[in-house]
Image (cartoon, helix red, strand yellow):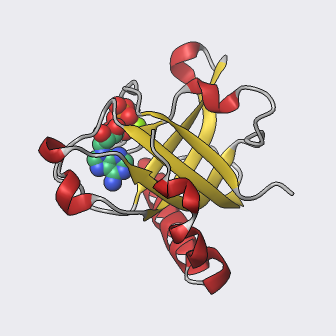
């Protein structure tokens, strides 16, 4: 059984692929999530839930929780496409960046493979669709239940 896939690690600094410019910041997981026997083999877009270990100054008290996420897995051009990255967009508005914080992710399903985009507008439109597909899927009780998964209660 492929899902759920449990991933965790400290949020890495990315290489400015324009996440925030596209209106879609993506928090990068460390490359260890691909270490064998990782179940994260297909590139493309996934959905599930995520949480971040925020402290007081990053809004911990207010934001502590588990939120819907969409995650892109792909080959990073910065590394001449020799290294895969897993980038998580959390569907929650944060007050601050959370680089270096511990992030936990439960991946529940696959949305689509990676496409080559002719325009930035086309890409932005697809990201919007991914978020809607993710949210609609997570509405199903069997998947909403993972919000309470004991994995999210474990300590770093
Ligand atoms: P980078 O190239 O460093 O990944 P991004 O533009 O993709 O830069 O921004 C990612 C960072 O934005 C995350 O590491 C996190 O600290 C912050 N961030 C703020 N809000 C979100 C969110 N809703 N989802 C993911 N990351 C977010
Ligand atoms: Mg990013």
Q: Which residue occupies 56% across, 77% down?
A: 144
Is any part of residue 22 visible from this angle?
no
Q: Which residue occupies 51% across, 18% down?
A: 78
Which quarter of the image is occupied by the C terminus? top left
Describe residue 61's horizontal placement relative to residue 91 as left or right.
left
Relative depth, front residue between 74 and 120: 74
From the top left corner, tell me how far across and down residue 90 is, in percent: 40, 56
Up the image or down, 78 lies above or below 150; here it is above
Up the image or down, 52 lies above or below 150; here it is above
Describe residue 32's horizontal placement relative to residue 53 as left or right.
right
Relative depth, front residue between 85 and 12: 12
Is any part of residue 1 visible from this angle?
yes
**Residue sitting at the far right:** 1
Give the image quadrant in which the ligand numbered 2 is located.
Answer: top left
Relative depth, front residue between 30 and 71: 30
From the top left corner, tell me how far across and down residue 61 is, in percent: 19, 57
Q: Which residue occupies 27% across, 46% down?
A: 54
Describe residue 148's horizontal placement relative to residue 115 as left or right.
left
Which quarter of the image is occupied by the N terminus? bottom right
Q: Picture quarter containing residue 34?
A: top right
From the top left corner, tell me how far across and down residue 102 is, in percent: 40, 38
From the top left corner, tell me how far across and down residue 14 is, in percent: 40, 27
């Amino acid at each position: 059984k492929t899902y759920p896939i449990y991933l965790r690690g400290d949020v890495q600094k990315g290489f400015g692929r324009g996440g925030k410019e596209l209106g879609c910041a993506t928090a990068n997981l460390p490359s260890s999530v691909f270490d064998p026997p990782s179940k994260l083999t297909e590139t493309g877009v996934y959905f599930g839930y995520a949480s971040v270990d925020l402290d007081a100054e990053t809004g911990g008290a207010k934001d502590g929780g588990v939120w819907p996420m969409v995650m892109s897995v792909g080959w990073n051009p910065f590394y001449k496409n020799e290294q895969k990255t897993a980038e998580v967009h959390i569907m929650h508005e944060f007050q601050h960046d959370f680089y270096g914080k511990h992030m936990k992710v439960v991946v529940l399903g696959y949305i689509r493979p990676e496409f080559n985009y002719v325009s930035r507008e086309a890409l932005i439109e697809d990201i919007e669709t991914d978020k809607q597909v993710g949210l609609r899927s997570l509405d199903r009780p069997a998947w909403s239940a993972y919000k309470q998964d004991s994995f999210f209660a474990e300590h770093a």
